[in-house]
Structures are given as structure tokens and as C-alpha cells.
Amino acid sequence: MELLLLIILIFMIVGSIIAIETKNLLSAVISVGVVGFCLSIAFLILGAPDIAITQVVVEILILVILIRATITTDNTAIERHWDTFSFISSLIFFGLFLVFAWLAVQELPRFGEPLLRVSSDYLETGPEKSGATNIVTGILLDFRAYDTIGEATVLFTSIVGAFVILRRRGRKHRKDMDREKVGILQDEDIKKDFRGF
Amino acid sequence: MVNLPDEVGDPTKGMTSIVKTIVRFVLGIVIMFGAYIVLYGHLTPGGGFAGGVILACGYITLTLAFGRELALRKMGDTAASILDNSGALAFLVIGFLGFTGGYFFLNFIDHGQTFRLFSAGIIPLCNIAIAFKVTSSLFAIFMALSIFGRFMSRLVEEEE
């Protein structure tokens, strides 16, 4: 089972390198999708079906949004040029990162033996205390409901921010004087900005 | 098979009739599966967030297949923001209702029998509130990224 996990992890690393290095934006988005689906398979192998379901669904949504909303703009080709100095310096820093990562990994607790004892306590007493047989939901919405409300706040704030930034015009009717003063775009400008949908 | 109005059969909008027919068959199953994931979140793997994203994916399928006008008629940006805010408010109100028994987010409803649908106190209610919030907000993000500025401006002028 660990061999399968290793194969999937190596495949994910290869996919992310392709996503960075390829010149076509559509290929990069598809490679990111491959990485995400492999991540959900890895969650399934590790025995976390909740996270696997969420990962698959969010990955589909993100792929659709990226392809539909990002690829329609014109900059699909990225120019790169070869630079010896940056290549050598990035190799050096990658070697340093490998050395320190190896030193840090030695100090980590072994796989499956966490330092905190609270998780095993949740596993033992979770179903009777929260009443939910799915322990993950029981922890999310009963023991750690503060974290969940923080997550909901983050989602809410990001969506309000996206609405404010992306809406090109306010809801209320404005006079042309105001439009010119504030610099709100006219329909002709919008048509110039976006060729087709 | 989902019943959709006749004028959406307009071949100039959306994708081809093959895609539209398949979406008619699949959409009901997708939305039913999303509702199942939400409602049984305290018994089987899943929960409010995953089920909400599945429901949002159903709406996005509708948008991609039938064009944006139909999707905006089904759930406009005003309806989406109202649903979003009411989901967040419902979650907060459930949390504050815990003060009736002592502290914030107290599971104040009787737990009931495990493995039953109506069990686990406030957890299914929280799941439903989160699902409403996630569905409407993710669909609103999709609309904001792909429609605003190109279509909304026309809508605003029609209102005026």
C-alpha cells in the first residue's frame, strides 16, 4: 500500500512540474487537475473518504472555473528565456532545501503515531458525545465548531471581495456625469475588453 | 428527467442538443446525490461542504449546457447573495442558540438514537446551513468570474 502511495506521489510531482514548465495555459490547467485527482486517490488510500469526496468535487469545480474563466483571455502563450545564473542559483537552493528538509524529517514523529493524544480521545468518545456516527463531521461541527465558523467567515469574506472587485458597475442607476467622474466603464469599453464569451 | 421550459431548446444558446439531453437526464441525479451527501453527512462520509459543492456543480452544469440566461433566471446574483447570507446567519444562530444550555455551539438538541437520520442534535442543521451557504457562494463566484461585465451590464440596462 505504501508503494502505491509512493507511485502516486511521484506522479503528482511530475504533474506539477509539467504544469509549471509547459507553455500552453490549457495544458497547465489540465496538469493541475491531474495532480488534484491523484491527491484524492491518495486520500482514499490513506483511509479518508470525507476528504477524498471534497477533493474530487472541488477539483472538478476549480477546473471548470479555470477553463471557463481564465482560458478565454488572450495570454495563452508564455514567453520564457534561458538564464544560466538563475538556473544555477535555483539548483543550489534546491540542494540546500533537500539537506535541511532531510534534517527536519528525521525529527518528525513516525507515520501513524501522533504526538497529540486528543485525537485518540476524540476517536474513542466521539460517537457517544456528539451522537454522529461519522466522526469527522462530529469533530467538525461539535468539538471544533469554532474552526468551522472561522472557515465559513473566510469563505464569506472572499466571496464578498470577489463580488466587489469583479462587478464593473454598481447596481443603482448612475448619471453619466458620475460615470465619467468615477471612471466606470461604458458598454463600448466592455465590448473592447472581452472579445466574445 | 428535469423539466425545463421550452424556450431553452433554442439551438443558438448553449451547447448542442446531445449535451442538453444528457444534462436533462443527469441533473436530477446530481442534485439528488448532493442532497443525500448533505442530509446524511452525520452518518456517512460527506457533509455540508462537499454536498454544497456538488449542488453548485449541478448549477454550473446547467449554466454550461443551456447558456447563462437560463441559469440567471433560476438563481440570479441577488438570490445567490441572499441565500449565502441566510446560510451564514443560520449557522451563527444555531451557534448562539447553544447559550440556552450554557455555551457557544452547545449541542442542545437531544442526540437520539445513533445511525438514525434524525439524530446527532444540531449537526444535521449545521450541515444544511453550510450547504446553502457553499452552494450559493460558489455559484456566485462562477457567475462573477464568467458573466459579470459582459452580461450583467445588459441586465442592469433592462431594469433601468
Image (cartoon, rainbow, N blue to C red):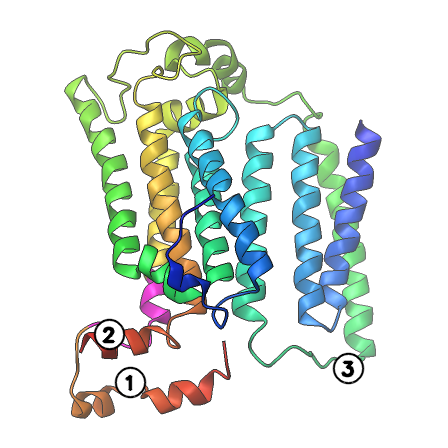
Q: Residue at x 17, y 23 (%)?
A: B99
Q: Are marks 1 and 2 in contact (CB under 8 Å)?
A: yes
Closer to the chain start, of discs 3 and 2, is: 3
Mark 3 vs 1: CB contact within 8 A? no
Q: Earlier in the sequence, mark 1 or mark 2?
A: 2
* Residue A44, image x, y percentages: 67, 31
Residue B53 or residue B20, whichever sits in front: B20
Decide which of A110, B24 is in the foreground and name it: B24
Q: CA distance from mark 1 to mark 2?
A: 9 Å
Total of numbered circles in the picture?
Answer: 3
* Magenta range: A161-171
Residue A144 sits inside the magenta stretch: no
Residue A169 lies within the magenta run = yes
- Asked where in the image residue A31 lies, by quadrant, the reply is bottom right
Question: In the image shown, does B112 or A78 lie closer to the viewer?
Answer: B112
Q: Residues within 10 Å of mark 2 (few under 14, many from 20)?
A: few
Q: Amino acid at mark 2?
A: Gly
C-alpha distance separating marks 3 and 1: 38 Å
Q: Residues within 10 Å of mark 3 (few under 14, many from 20)?
A: few
Residue denoted by label 3: A81
Q: Label 1 lies in what chain?
A: A
Residue at x-position 74% and y-position 79%: A80
Residue B17: % across, % down: 56, 61
Q: Secondary structure at mark 3?
A: loop
Q: Which residue is mark 2?
A: A170
